[in-house]
Image (cartoon, grey):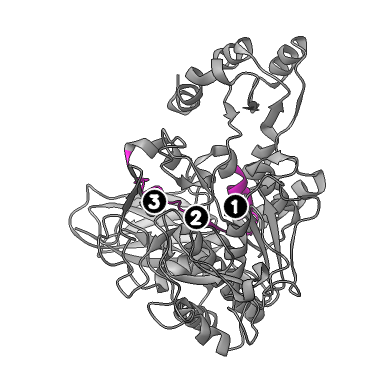
């Protein structure tokens, strides 16, 4: 049995006796389709496509993906997933015998990644995360006239208070037909109010101001709807309503390896392959995805997460949580009821935002909120966790996308935006062995784009190689570029490595010159009918 299938079987098989009849089963029918359908029909089990995407939307996504990354394979693969009306042990045995990938959906409600006790400190007198380092330098970009214009934000959340004074006359709403479940308490719904404040708070004379307050529109997609709890449905609806260049914010986390309610080990939502599939489809088709790393203090580079890392790069910008000072270190871990919390970390985490002291709207219990005039619709609080960090980054990329769109009448991909943020951000300090990435400087990112637009093709800036120097194993991140050929030359001009076949399902390419001598080499990359050369150093 392959490792790929072993993961799914080992993760869920032991629990099956307890899950049958309580949860749902999704299968991936990329093979054995006719035989499987016949078997299920004989048992009276019906199937429906798992991802509720119209044919017109599929065609739009496929066309966008081909234009942007040269292949629509990840979009097409979504059609292979089916939801079964019921299942039992005989079904599981059949799937295992045929080596058909399956996934049991546990409908347990996962809390949003923010405001874990202890109680957050009193909020600052102003939104210092908008200012110069240690802030995002957002105000400097506003002064240039950019605050998110002509960009749409889609926020996957639980709910928010539309009647709040910061939003009651703004262009933000819960997506049509997606009413928030009436069982959702303020701990869930007000999480969205806090996120929306950071993203889109009104730029008025009172209260707070959202980073992307000039955005064209914000839609919220509740995971916990009146019809029930479904994360994948919320994301699918965001996908259905999105267009190229839109920003999708994942304000959610998943239970990590061996995670339970009492010891959740929170990690990015895309730890679930079913979520990763949708994320990849979004980024392949030109949408920017900004997602929380989760508050579980997990090392994504550990053996526990080998399977997750094996999925490949989804293209999402994964956001960790750092300190609200110029050190920009990972937020210090703290223990609550024997469980350690702070930002999850590792090479898959791209950039960081503030884990603490984020002044925003809302009234999450335990957040130190204030009601102005005892009015719930005038609530302000201190936001914490990778939720506050992700909201900051969602606002930042919206503003930067707005600038790029205004200058080019085009949009950046998720991978391109990620590259810019990483290359222009302030390096992480403190314990850098627990990587949460650099802290973005919005003005530096804008200046980089301006220089790039004025002096060179964005092609070059969207490609980067890491680590450099290295021991001979390099990774080329190709962004949305379709790589055609890679050659490595020594200083005499001799070709020491050449490669022309690549895995189109990922934008990361391994380059191995470990056997070469120490020294300087030149990496020639050909893509999109263009070539560039980058210098690499082998230690």
Q: CA distance from mark 3 to mark 1?
A: 21 Å
Q: Which residue is mark 2?
A: 292
Describe residue 252's horizontal placement relative to residue 433 as left or right: right
| The residue stretch that appears in magenta | 277-302
Look at 36% across and 36% down and name the residue there: 304
Question: In terms of sequence position, does the residue under pointer 3 or pointer 1 come before the other?
Answer: 1
Q: Position of residue 206 (x, y in %)?
A: 62, 84
| Label 1 secondary element | helix
Magenta stretch: includes residue 382 = no
| 277 w.r.t. 171: above or below | above
Question: In terms of sequence position, does the residue under pointer 2 or pointer 3 come before the other?
Answer: 2
Estimate how packed mark 2 is, as few (under 14), some (14 to 19) or many (20 or more) residues with alpha carbons within 10 Å.
many
Magenta stretch: includes residue 292 = yes
Describe residue 413's horizontal placement relative to residue 173 as left or right: left
Q: Which callout, 1 or 2, points to the residue nearer the camera?
A: 1
Q: Which residue is mark 3?
A: 344
Q: Nearer the viewer, residue 358 or 74?
A: 358
Q: CA distance from mark 2 to mark 3?
A: 9 Å
Look at 52% across and 68% down and name the residue there: 381
Q: Which residue is mark 1?
A: 188
């Amino acid at each position: 049995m392959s490792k790929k299938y072993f993961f799914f079987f080992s993760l869920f098989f032991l629990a099956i006796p307890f899950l049958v009849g309580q949860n749902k089963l999704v299968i991936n029918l990329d093979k054995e389709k006719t035989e499987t359908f016949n078997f299920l029909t004989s048992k009276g089990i019906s199937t429906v496509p798992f991802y509720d995407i119209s044919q017109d939307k599929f065609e739009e996504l496929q066309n966008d993906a081909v234009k942007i990354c040269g292949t629509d394979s990840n979009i097409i693969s979504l059609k292979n997933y089916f939801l079964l009306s019921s299942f039992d042990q005989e079904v599981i045995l059949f799937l295992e015998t045929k080596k058909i990938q399956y996934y049991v959906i546990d409908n347990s409600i996962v809390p949003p990644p923010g405001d874990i006790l202890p109680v957050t400190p009193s909020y600052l007198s102003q939104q210092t995360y908008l200012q110069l380092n240690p802030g995002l330098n957002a105000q400097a970009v506003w002064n240039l006239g950019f605050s998110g214009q002509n960009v749409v934000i889609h926020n996957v959340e639980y709910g928010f208070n539309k009647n709040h004074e910061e939003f009651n006359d703004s262009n933000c709403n819960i997506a049509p037909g997606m009413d928030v479940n009436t069982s959702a308490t303020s701990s869930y719904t007000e999480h969205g109010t806090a996120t929306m404040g950071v993203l889109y708070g009104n730029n008025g004379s009172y209260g707070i101001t959202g980073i992307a307050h000039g955005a064209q529109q914000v839609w919220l997609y509740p995971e916990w709807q009146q019809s029930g709890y479904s994360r994948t449905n919320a994301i699918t609806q965001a996908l259905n309503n999105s267009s190229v260049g839109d920003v999708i914010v994942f304000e959610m986390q998943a239970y990590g390896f061996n995670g339970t309610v009492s010891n959740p080990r929170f990690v990015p939502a895309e730890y679930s392959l079913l979520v990763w599939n949708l994320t990849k489809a979004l980024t392949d088709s030109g949408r920017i995805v900004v997602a929380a790393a989760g508050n579980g203090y997990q090392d994504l580079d550990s053996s526990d997460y080998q399977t997750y890392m094996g999925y490949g790069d989804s293209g999402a910008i994964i956001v960790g949580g750092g300190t609200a000072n110029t050190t920009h270190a990972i937020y210090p871990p703290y223990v609550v009821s024997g469980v350690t919390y702070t930002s999850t970390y590792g090479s898959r985490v791209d950039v960081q935002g503030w884990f603490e002291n984020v002044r925003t709207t809302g009234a999450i219990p335990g957040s130190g909120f204030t009601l102005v005039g005892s009015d719930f619709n005038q609530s302000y609080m201190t936001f914490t966790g990778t939720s506050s960090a992700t909201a900051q980054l969602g606002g930042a990329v919206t503003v930067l996308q707005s600038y790029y769109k205004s200058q080019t009448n085009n949009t950046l991909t998720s991978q391109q935006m990620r590259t810019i943020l990483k290359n222009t951000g302030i390096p992480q300090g403190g314990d850098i062995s627990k990587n949460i990435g650099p802290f973005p400087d919005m003005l530096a990112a804008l200046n980089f784009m301006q220089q790039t637009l004025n002096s060179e093709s964005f092609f070059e800036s969207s490609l980067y190689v890491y680590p450099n120097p290295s021991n001979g194993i390099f990774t080329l991140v190709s962004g949305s570029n379709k790589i055609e050929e890679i050659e490595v030359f020594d200083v005499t001009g001799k070709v020491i490595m050449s490669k022309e076949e690549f895995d189109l399902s990922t934008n990361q390419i391994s380059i191995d010159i470990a056997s070469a001598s120490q020294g300087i080499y030149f990496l020639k990359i050909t893509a999109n009918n263009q070539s560039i050369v980058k210098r690499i150093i082998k230690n």
